[in-house]
Amino acid sequence: MKKILALALVLSCLMSGVAFAKVTLVYAEVNPLDTIVGQMATAFKNKVEELSKGDVIIDIQAGGVLGSEAQVLDGILGGGDTVDMSRISAFALTSYGCQKAMLLSIPYTFVSRAHFWNFANSDLAQEFLAEPHNVGLPLRGICYGEEGFRHFFFKQKVSGLADLKGKKIRVSDDPIMTGMVKNLGANPTVVTYTELYSALQTGVTDAAEQPIANYRSNAFNEVAPCLLLDGHTLGAVQIIIADSGWNKLNDQQRGWLMEAGKFVQGENAKISEKEENAVLELLKTEGTTVVDVPDKAPWIKACQPTIQANTKSQAELYKKLVDFQN
């Protein structure tokens, strides 16, 4: 009887010309829209609105106006309804019990972009995306992307690994990042992302690390003009949706979101390297000192304590990740 009544209501609305209410999902992005991940957000918005013919609207709030990644995640997990969706770093879920996600942030795991995309386009990646929901968190992953390899940048010129000794390097509150920085001889200093520019400016920290595009878009090159291309991790990211946002959608609308996710994953793979290379050349012309790291072997050797300590409990799964390079 309920189904009959619901169908009658739908037919009545259609016949009377009454439109159903549109669904608006608020999408948080900590970086500006001109970054690789900002472009990812715009592509996702455009595709969802195209597929839904405007019935699902993605309201992008970029530039960290809704807080850092950690603040956004804390809000979602605390039951807040300000944010429906977000683009987050894959390792951000590590602090919330996602052990598989942790493996994506292990230093020097991905040797190339092709290595990462072999994983991201695999069935195994779907298991990783489902992990938050499977461990009881009120959110789920939609798709993967990447924003380039992450590199260290410094206020003063450095030339190699030895120069990191004693440097205060900004880290997020993440044990793997903290361990890696200690292994490299530096002092990890926890600073929120939104306070990083001023922390570099005032000397609270001597250095930090980001993908190249984010480094320039956030003007970190103004206060830390030496970029060291060590490529310690690939900036693996994912788009997530909170259960509160998911529950606003019917099955067809959810299908549109997932289809848009597949599209955006492919678009990100096409543009990321090209965009990053263009930004790197621009940085050079603007006066940034760019230091290559031709031999990463000493860096990898130094980080073995952190690599081994954080992979031994999932050794078989980690080997599968490593093997995607072949």
Image (cartoon, rainbow, N blue to C red):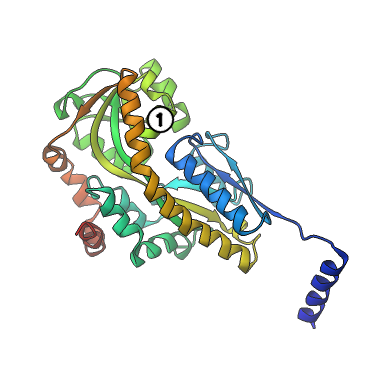
Q: Nearer the viewer, residue 14 or 219?
A: 14
- Describe residue 242's horizontal placement relative to residue 189 as left or right: right
Tell me the quarter of the image containing the C terminus: bottom left
Residue closest to the eye, 49 or 160 = 49
Tell me if I can see residue 189 in this picture. Answer: no
Characterize the local packing of mark 1: few (<14), some (14-19) or many (20 or more) Cα atoms within 10 angstroms.
some
Location of residue 201 by image quarter: top left
Q: What type is the residue that disc 1 sits on? A: Val
Residue 86 at what x, y percent from top left? 52, 47
Residue at 57 percent of width and 49 percent of height: 46
**The image quarter in which residue 121 lies:** bottom left
Left or right of 170 on screen, residue 290? left
- Quarter of the image holding residue 179? top left
Q: Secondary structure at mark 1?
A: loop
- Where is the N terminus found, in terms of image quarters? bottom right
* Residue 318, percent from left and from top: 24, 59
User: What is the count of numbered marks?
Assistant: 1
Looking at the picture, tell me which residue is in the foreground, 163 or 308: 163
Q: Which residue is mark 1?
A: 191
Residue 307 seen by the camera: yes
Image coords of residue 39 (percent x, y):
48, 41
Q: Is residue 52 left or right of residue 32?
A: right
Query: Residue 135 versus residue 37: which sits nearer the camera?
Result: 37
Q: Where does residue 256 sit, x and y in percent of width and height?
A: 57, 62
